Image (cartoon, rainbow, N blue to C red):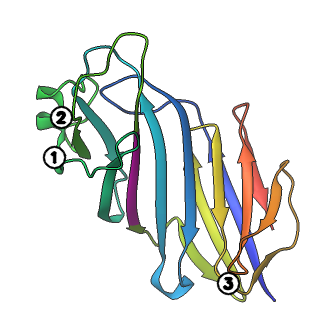
Amino acid sequence: MKKFFLLLFLFSGYWASAQTTDDYTRYELLDPATNSFKILYEVSATTPGATWFHNTLRKGSEHKVDRVIDMASGKPLVWSIVNGEEARKNGLASADKDTEYLQIKLQHAVAKNSEYRLLIDKTYADLKSYFTEGDKIVFDRSLGIKRNSVVLPKGYELTACNYPAQIMLESDGRLKISLSIVALMRSRFT
């Protein structure tokens, strides 16, 4: 078995034009030679009246948006990649002018005391976040939400863990490490 090393920098906060809640991110590590990983991000927009949702695209990574889905209807949503100025025009007051954002048009405004559930499916190639060291792979990434999982490529195992996590075997033989972050801290997996 090959070894897996995971270093997470955890922080609180998120970036979206509509207030979010109940976030979950699944990171699927792809072939280590590609330095790429798939991100499946489930999020609920809860700001009443919001018609746009913005997701920050990490600086320094190559990003490809595969799809954005309205979870209630299962229908694809219209999206574009915009700069900070455009994101500000559509409700993201905190948008950084030097950052790119995934801008998503919601099918309807978020109703009062309600939520709008989305699935964002994107792939990043990021040598600083995902790389190899000898026979180990390293996933070194800041996480800003509380519920996450990391799925290892087939043939890799987790050899030690200093943060509470659940380890599960996926139906295709890959290992999934599930984390529920409740405090600001730095975690290391080897």
Q: Residue furthest top?
A: 112
Q: CA distance from mark 1 to mark 2?
A: 6 Å
Query: Which secondary structure type mostly characterizes the magenta part of the structure?
Result: strand
Reading the image, the residue beneath label 2 is: 87
Start-end of magenta stretch: 118-123
| C-alpha distance separating marks 2 and 3 | 38 Å
Look at mark 3 in the image and give the residue it sits on: 154
Q: Secondary structure at mark 2?
A: helix
Magenta segment includes 165: no
Check whether the beta carbons of the residues at disc 3 and disc 1 lie within 8 A of each other.
no
Residue 44 visible? The answer is: yes
For marks 3 and 1, give the one nearer the viewer.
Answer: 3
Looking at the image, residue 85 sits to the left or right of residue 35; the answer is: left
**Of the image marks 1 and 2, the number of the one nearer the N terminus:** 1
Label 1 is placed on what type of residue? Val
Spatial CA distance of label 3 from label 1 is 35 Å
Please, is residue 115 above or below residue 144 in the view? above
Q: On screen, 11 above or below 189? A: above
User: Where is residue 96 shown, x and y percent of the image?
Assistant: 25, 35
> Which of pointers 3 and 1 lies earlier in the amino acid sequence?
1
Q: Residue at x 64, y 42 (%)?
A: 147
Which quarter shows the N terminus? bottom right
The amino acid pointed to by label 2 is Ala
**Percent coordinates x, y for residue 77 in the rendering:** 24, 47
129 to the left or right of 88: right
